[in-house]
Amino acid sequence: MENKIRYELEFPLNSSPQLLYQYISTPSGLSEWFADNVNSRGEFFTFIWNDNEEKARLASKKTGEKVKFRWVEEDGKDGEYFFELRILVDEITKDVSLMVVDFAEEDEVDESKQLWDNQISDLKHVIGSV
């Protein structure tokens, strides 16, 4: 398997950091915009899209600021790749943005970025930030 490329995207959102954190850190919040369904058992989250299931471990979180999910391999071990959702607040303007850190294979980076655009668009509708 070829190495994936790390990329970052930043999306401005009209939301309070506290509200936004609920949508990026809880199964119920994530299932409203990120996946069709999200279940969790302890630190393990199962993301379901159509009939596909992907498992990830909540690798780290800082309440009100960020969550990082590390994909779990089929053997149950932590994978090499993760995605991180980080809330940024401009100190002067108090503008809120969501920073996405993710990985994709070189020929799929544009497609992955487009997917994030679509998902963040869904998130904006859910939180009333359109």
Image (cartoon, rainbow, N blue to C red):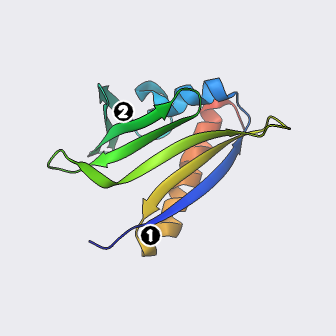
As drawn, is 24 to the left or to the right of 96?
Answer: left
Give the residue drawn at x 47%, y 55%.
102
As drawn, is 91 to the left or to the right of 53?
Answer: right
Kind of residue sitting beneath label 2: Val
As drawn, is 119 to the left or to the right of 60?
Answer: right
- The picture places residue 96, in percent across and down from the top left corner, at 72, 38
Give the residue drawn at x 55%, y 50%.
100
Residue contact at pointers 2 and 1, CB within 8 angstroms: no
Query: For numbered disc 1, what is the local secondary structure?
Result: helix
Image quadrant assignment for residue 59? top left
Distance between the alpha carbons at the discs numbered 2 and 1 = 24 Å
Give the residue drawn at x 49%, y 46%.
84
State the residue in front, 102 or 128: 102
Q: Badge 1: few (under 14), some or many (20 or more) residues near its Cα, within 10 Å?
A: few
- Give the number of callouts: 2
State the residue in front, 90 or 96: 90
Circle on res. 108: 1
- The picture places residue 92, in percent across and down from the top left corner, at 85, 38
- The picture places residue 38, in percent across and down from the top left corner, at 36, 33
Ranked by sequence position, the earlier of labels 2 and 1 is: 2
Query: For numbered disc 2, what is the local secondary structure?
Result: strand
Quarter holding the N terminus is bottom left
